[in-house]
Image (cartoon, grey):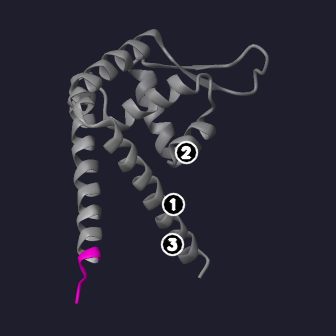
């Protein structure tokens, strides 16, 4: 027997799945328009936000395996969107940074993405704050459940 609360919780989870799928489709469409994959676009964003980061740090930040990120970086370097560089102050390490072309692709994709999301600005700011607070609480509760299950 399901209560109304249980039904609503299932509807919320389903709505999260739908929103995630729609954002993923939008991100995929946007990235394809600019000649990169969704993961490559995410990598470009991470490099913009963390210039001159190492591969291991980048993999940790993106919560992906080093071999996965290494392959993505190889393709981005080949496409001349990312540069591997040895800093003058530490010749033992390699850092990654956006090339000028990579910065332009990211800028153009971000502009297009924001344009597609502009309709969301019509949502009531107070409702958005309530939704954001609720999402944070849900995330916290789910993380607690996950952590409890990992310790069993």
> Which of the two discs, 3 and 2, labels the residue nearer the N terminus?
2
Q: CB of mark 1 within 8 Å of CB of mark 3?
A: no
Q: Is residue 123 visible?
A: yes
Badge 3 element: helix
In this rendered view, identify the residue nearer to me: 97 or 61.
Answer: 61
Specify the quadrant that holds the N terminus.
bottom left
> Which of the two discs, 1 and 3, labels the residue nearer the N terminus?
1
Residue 53 at what x, y percent from top left?
A: 62, 28
Q: Quadrant of residue 22?
A: top left
What residue would you read off at disc 1? Answer: 140
Badge 1 element: helix
What residue would you read off at disc 2? Answer: 66
Q: Quadrant of residue 44?
A: top left
Asked if 77 appears above or below 43 in the picture, the reply is: above
Q: CB of mark 2 within 8 Å of CB of mark 1?
A: no
Badge 2 element: helix
Q: CA distance from mark 1 to mark 3?
A: 9 Å
Q: CA distance from mark 3 to mark 2?
A: 27 Å
């Amino acid at each position: 027997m399901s209560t109304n609360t249980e039904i609503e919780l299932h509807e919320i989870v389903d709505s999260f799945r739908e929103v995630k799928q729609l954002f993923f489709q939008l991100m995929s469409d946007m990235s394809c328009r600019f000649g990169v994959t969704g993961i490559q676009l995410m990598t470009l964003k991470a490099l913009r936000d963390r210039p001159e980061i190492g591969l291991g740090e980048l993999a940790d930040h993106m919560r992906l395996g080093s071999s996965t990120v290494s392959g993505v970086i190889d393709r981005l370097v080949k496409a001349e969107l990312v540069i591997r560089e040895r800093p003058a102050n530490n010749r033992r390490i390699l850092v990654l940074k956006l090339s000028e072309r990579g910065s332009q692709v990211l800028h153009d994709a971000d502009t297009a993405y924001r344009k597609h999301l502009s309709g969301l600005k019509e949502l009531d700011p107070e409702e958005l704050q309530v939704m954001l607070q609720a999402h944070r609480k849900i995330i916290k509760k789910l993380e607690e459940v996950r952590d409890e299950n990992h310790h069993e």
